Every structure is written in structure tokens, then in C-alpha cells.
Amino acid sequence: MFKLWSESKKEAKNELKPNLGLKSWNDLNHTEKSNIWKHLSNYFFEHSGFDNNEFEFIGGYPDKDLKKKRILYTITSLNDFYKVNNYTPSFLNNPNLNTACADFYSIFINQSENVVFELLSIYSKLILAERKDDEPYSEKNETEEKFKLRTIEWRFEIFDEFSNRLNKVLGDFGINILLTRLEFIPRQDKKIIEEVYEPVISFLSNSKWKEVSSILADAFQEYRKKTPQGYSNCVTNTVSAIQAFLQILDSEKTGKGAISYLITEAQKKNLIPNDFFTQKIFDNIESIFARERQEIGIAHPKKEYANERNARTILNLSMIFFQHCIQK
């Protein structure tokens, strides 16, 4: 099979696509942000007039009307949520699609990471809502279980396409944030994301695990605050998500039960692996969770606050724990 020059020359690959390392949105310059926008314009719109704000919605998929609706609703929400800072001055003075586009683009290019990713979060949430209560047509001789699984994938189909594109572009520019079905999370090693985080978050997107996803989303939100208190809150919420998962697994609802007890009960019922190797893993992970929550979480008086390394380790361990359970 014919190889590209970059496939046989490592130095060429490094020159064509250099490893920029991980950085925040705030580290980007105006040109880089503008280039990112152009790579994503098919999902938003083309900004062709820098002096008089000319906007063009490109045809194709998704269709123009749907994209217009998303932009308008996103700016309307941002205008309503954050009145004091007034991130949408054009829309506030003259609310219409054109001023919504002007503010959307201005925020993307000129505002800080927190504002930009709040904007993208609202936009992403709107995509998820478009198919939230709908179902695809059932196929002939399809079992109820198969239909349920296919419905979940169908409901996330458009969002997954958008998130894949967004993550690819942000990754090429070294941005340290990743969009998932749950929310924006810290970008990790590609192998960890593809083999652990993405399968787990996809599994937890089932409505059965709604409470677990909600607690886990809180954990990621606290992590992104990048403060000692936030990291400690992240640890506590992450361990709580594990506990909620085991409670639902054991009794179909959240309630009572320590992690060690719930693991034993789940193994007795053959709900999670029970071989010797797995037992040792669960014993060690449960011990780590308990110790970390005791010492640096918010559930008890802290000996010290958590730091970014503590919080990220607990997040990664929790994802490995979930993955091992769902592989059963």
C-alpha cells in the first residue's frame, strides 16, 4: 500500500504535525483561535466580514436552520444566565440572528477559556436535547434490548459527530480539554481516553446511571476550578460516584452501603468479576478511595487539601474501576 512521505519519515511527521504539548485556551493567540474557528465553521457559520459582521451558514449536515437555531438559543441562554458581565452586548441591544452570530464569534475569539467553554457547553447541551425524547424506527425482528441500545446510540449520534470533530481540532492545537457525553473533561493520554474514559462515559450515558453521571460531572466541574478546595471536592464526588454506581448495581437505586460491603455483595450476585486477581484490585482500590476521601476529601476534617495530581489519580482510578465492572 502506498505510503505518505510523513509515514516513512519521522522527521517529516514531526515537522508537519509538531507535538505542541498541552496548554489552555488562554495560551492561544488570535490567529490560532481564528484558525480553530475555520476548522469548525461547518458546525457554526462562516465569518466573512470583519468590518460589518457578515455571516454565512453553510449547507449540508447539519442543515442551516438547525445551526441557526442552536446559535440563537446559545446566545439567548448566555445573555439570560450572565446578565452582569454582559457577554452578548450586540444581542442585548438588538436581539436577532445576526447579532447572535456577532456575539457568538466575538466570545469565541476574544473571551477567556471559562467563557468560551461555557458557550460551547450550552451549544453542546442543545445538540443533546434535539433527540433527547425521540426514538428511531424499530427494525424487523429486533429485540427490546437491542432497540434500547440502538436508541441510546441514535440519540447521541449528532453530538458524537460534533464532539469528535471538536476534540480532533482542539487536540491538534494542544488544548487540554476534551468534550464527552458527560461534559468537558481534562484531556489525558490518547490511549487512556480511547480505551478507558470514552467507553465508560458512553456506558454511563444510559438513563439507568443518571445519578452516577451527575455526581461524576460534579467531580469534573470541581477539578476544572483548579483550586485546593476544588480538587478536594473532586475527590469526594468521585468516590461518591463509585458508591452510587455500586448501590444502583446492587439494588437498582442509590441508598445505603459502604463501598467494601457493596463490592462484596455485587460479587456474590455475580454482577462484577470475582476472580482472585480482580478481588485484589478491588481491595486495593477500595482502600485507596477510603484513605483519600478521609484525608483530602470534604467528607471529613482534612489533614491536607488535595492537589491536581491527587484528584487526577482518583479520577483515573475510578474510570478503571468502572471499566472493569462493565466488562463483566
Image (spheres, rainbow, N blue to C red):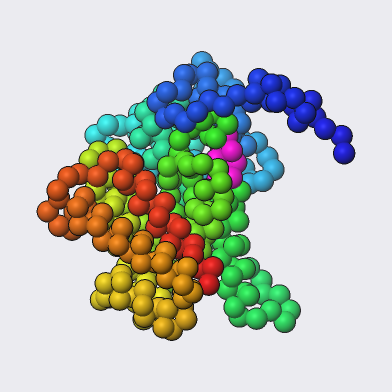
Q: Residue 165 magenta-drawn?
A: yes
Return the x and y of residue 88 as percentages of the image width and height. Answer: 37, 32
Vertical arrangement, residue 97 with respect to residue 327, above or below: above
Which residue is found at the position 48% from the left and 42% from the top?
188
The stretch drawn in magenta includes residue 78? no
Magenta-tinted stretch: 163-169
The majority secondary structure of the magenta stretch comes to: helix
* Direction from residue 210 to residue 168 in the image, left or right: right
Q: Kindly tell me whether residue 32 is visible in this rendering.
A: yes
Q: Which of the two residues, 204 or 42, is positioned nearer the viewer here?
A: 204
Left or right: where does residue 234 sit relative to residue 44?
left
Quadrant for the N terminus, please: top right
User: Quarter of the image holding residue 145?
Assistant: bottom right
Q: Specify the quadrant of the image occupied by residue 58.
A: top right
Q: Position of residue 146 (x, y in %)?
A: 63, 75
Q: Residue at x 42, y 42 (%)?
A: 186
The reply to whether residue 55 is in sight is no
The residue under the point 57% across, 27% down is 19
Above-or-below relation of 163 to 143? above
Q: Tell me what residue is drawn at x 56 percent, y 65 percent.
A: 152
